[in-house]
Amino acid sequence: MNASSQSIGQSLDRVDGLLKVTGQARYAGEYPEDGLLHGSVVSSKIARGRVLRIDASRALALPGVVAVIDHANRPRIASYDEPYQDADAADGSPFRPLYNDQILYSGQPLALVVAENLELARYAGSLIEIDYEAQDHQTDLAILQNEAHPAPAELPKPRGNFQGEYASAALSVDVSYSTPIEHHNPMEPHASTVLFQPDGSLHIHDKTQGTQNCQAYVQKVFGLEMEQVRVFAAFVGGAFGSGLRPQYQLPLAVMAALALKRSVRVSLTRQQMFTFGYRPRTLQRVQLGAAANGRLLAVAHTAVGQTSRFEDFTEHVVEWSGMLYHCDNVTLTYKLVPLDVYTPLDMRAPGAALGLIGLECAMDELACALAIDPVQLRLINYAERNENEGKPYSSKELRECYAQGAQRFGWDKRNPEPRSMREGRQLVGWGMAGGVWEAMQQKASAKASLDTDGKLTVSSATTDIGTGTYTVMTQIAAESCGVSLENVTFVLGDSSLPTAPLQGGSFTVSSVGTAVQQACEALKEKLLAVARQACPAFSGATLEQVVFVDGQLRLGEASVALAELAQKKRRDAVAGPGHRRTGRKTPGLRHRYPFGGVRRSVGG
Amino acid sequence: MNPFHYSKPDTVQAAIDLSSPVSRFIAGGTNLLDLMKENLTRPEHLIDITGLPLADLSETPSGGVMIGALVSNADLAWHPWIERRYPLLSQAILAGASPQLRNMASTGGNLLQRTRCYYFYDANVPCNKRQPGSGCPARDGLNRIHAIFGASDQCVATHPSDMCVALAALEAVVHVLGRGGARTIEFADFHRLPGDAPERDNQLADDELVTAIELPAPGFAEHSHYLKIRDRASYAFALVSVAAALELDGPVIRQARLALGGVAHKPWRDRAVESWLNGKTVSRETFTAAADALLQNAEPLEHNGFKVRLARRAIVRALSDAALGVAPQGGQA
């Protein structure tokens, strides 16, 4: 077994921090190449209709403009849905860039200008004239909310008798909320640099949260072999979910590269960052019925979200209202309204960040109506089990979280009377809310190898969208193998590395981290096997008996450097095989959900 | 952005000689470059004026201050003369933009920044200010941030500057030079109401360059206040802002200046209300009556009726704080 080392839990500088702050970290739109061409996207000015004519003559007349690609002259792309259905696709028929003359939303890409430099490409794009046949469109969820259809989501079945209990409850609240569209808009705009290789294969630097997702998408959409497409994402300047699906700059850049047999970069403008996935607007209604003592007797939560006319985007919006509090009578409803907009996309705690607003605001309304402290109301209704599924939690510390939060905030000094508290001249109010999120794990794999200098290299095709994957995985590997942090390199962001899931859902550390740990365990078994043969002191030793620490293998007084073991293995590096673990999105009998508490002081 | 010629003259006269209907002067470029990148404006010739000797402050014979057009917004806000004698101006400048932008933006350029109307910035929709005669989608569209005073059927945009609201209250004078020679323009006359020519924000001719802003001697340093109300606490344009300046004799108002930002195509003043305040005693009732009088002619649109209520409270607070001599709360940006 391992002696406890110092790697995990240490407060460290990010291992990639120096590269980032000194500008050496290259992002997708920053890879230079001689002869690189630049693409600029021309976007639709209308929300629905048809392209009648694209006149690119003025653009093409400019010296240095190489091509204008549109639906009429693009390279061949797949003509059925499956190739476009990436690992995070919603139900339906995914958007196909430059596929035909149909306009499905405002800002849709209609043409790509390819030129010798970015400025020229953008200017040329401004000279392209497009004739439209505009059709009536609707982008307002509120106007079409009565046409909502049930979302294709597996909601918990209604439990108990909501209507009966709600009607007879001593106190009830019936409140409606709306949440606006939110765009991810990370600091780094979406960009793809497609480097056309001499053999015709493509090396693509893409802004993505999943290199293998993009590799598969490009391969399938363009009918290529997997070996012909390699996708890199060494650094990602924030994503928040916007890189979960391949975005349209990727297929556009690939189209240009394949058509021209040249390397091409396409970067989206800040304005174009508003022309693909986003957190959808929702309209919500929450009905709570309670006894005079604060016990929740009835909960109903209805959410209506917007989606596109081509895909039904769903997320977990209302489930939390059957989970966060104990209640025997619960009805949850989730509907969608298709609009002339792009399909929404997962964004930072997708669904939960919406539904919990409704639930927690309604709980505050109830606390006010009952004249019960809002924290107290939540404790009265504390859920010991996941009542949506009738399963216990492996651990849940929310009660302690409430207590610590209240203590640190000075909650006992709160006056619940509205407009009773001031800071200086400003009226202030103190509020709180609880949170809940899924603890998921996905299939992931990693590879670990030790070279003859004792340097450990661990790799997986995951990404680091600024969340610290490089650092965390380095810590896990260092601790697992008993090697100092300086001697560990973690490699990610390359589709040719061992399989990793999309980086999202707060499951990267639990999934990839576990794979890293297990790859390191496999490596340690190999190192011990070498020691058993080469060092008499270790003959017959088992993994449970030995210790990996400070770059050494130890058994009592005996020790041998790991580097030496690597050298003894006929000067070959020792490698632990890629280790694959089974996906566990819904672990057996026990569920794990992290909980969070929020307390806020709001000026007014 | 379109291809353009670029010149960098050394003298003011050379800059004016270079100007033409298709040229634009550029100093900090904090607004012009954005407009060019979005193809909202396409000058064929940029005349870089940052090499001109217009970056000094000096005292005028009448006891005021002459501010060169190229003094940066940051340097102006933090200049000891301005901080001490014209704190209203310093507060207003620091309420706008961000430190980076204030470092780049020039005093003259601040006067010439263009509206932030959503429709003006969206080249895909009509806009009379951008393309005369094409229409105004804001009048019946999303007009939450738009004007409640002085709008026309052709345009409901507001002027975005904070600095100009203070300059209006201080009755600054704009010095300009053109092919026809030098002239001065009272600040109140510098910006236009949209009328039927919303493409023109101000009275400058194509060949005219703002060379300086002159502040008269009275700075209302004892009793002035700039209050800006916006959707977020920093880096946002005013929904409503109020520059209030009072000259007091004990509790009696001897002179009042009141200018509003975020409500019209130009900093909005109502001389009748200012005159009415003269001789009145400082009180909440007095200020409320002034606010009501000023706002009785407001013409809100579908989504900006809140600005009338907001302006009423903002005027009362700004005048009250000016009377008390209270510095603004909170951050500077």
Image (spheres, coloured by chain):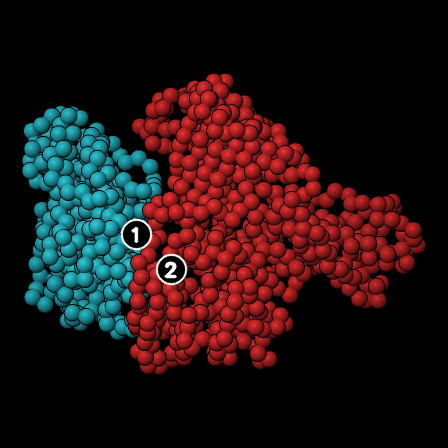
The quadrant of the rendering that contains the N terminus of chain B is bottom left
Residue A391, quarter of the rendered image: top right
Chain letter corresponding to the colour red: A
Q: Mark 1, residues whose alpha carbon is within 10 Å: few (<14), some, or many (≥20)?
A: many
Q: Is residue A186 visible?
A: no
Left or right: A480, with A16 as reference point? right
Q: CA distance from mark 2 to mark 1?
A: 38 Å
Chain letter corresponding to the colour cyan: B
Q: Residue at x 19, y 62 (%)?
A: B134
Judge by depth and name the residue closer to the eye, A276 or A531: A276
Q: Which residue is mark 1?
A: B102
The percent coordinates of residue B237 (x first, y second) are 28, 47
Q: Is residue B301 visible?
A: yes
Chain letter for the residue marked with disc 2 in the picture: A
Instruction: Using the image, tell me which numbered label, if any, was put on residue A105.
Output: 2
Residue A64, quarter of the rendered image: bottom left
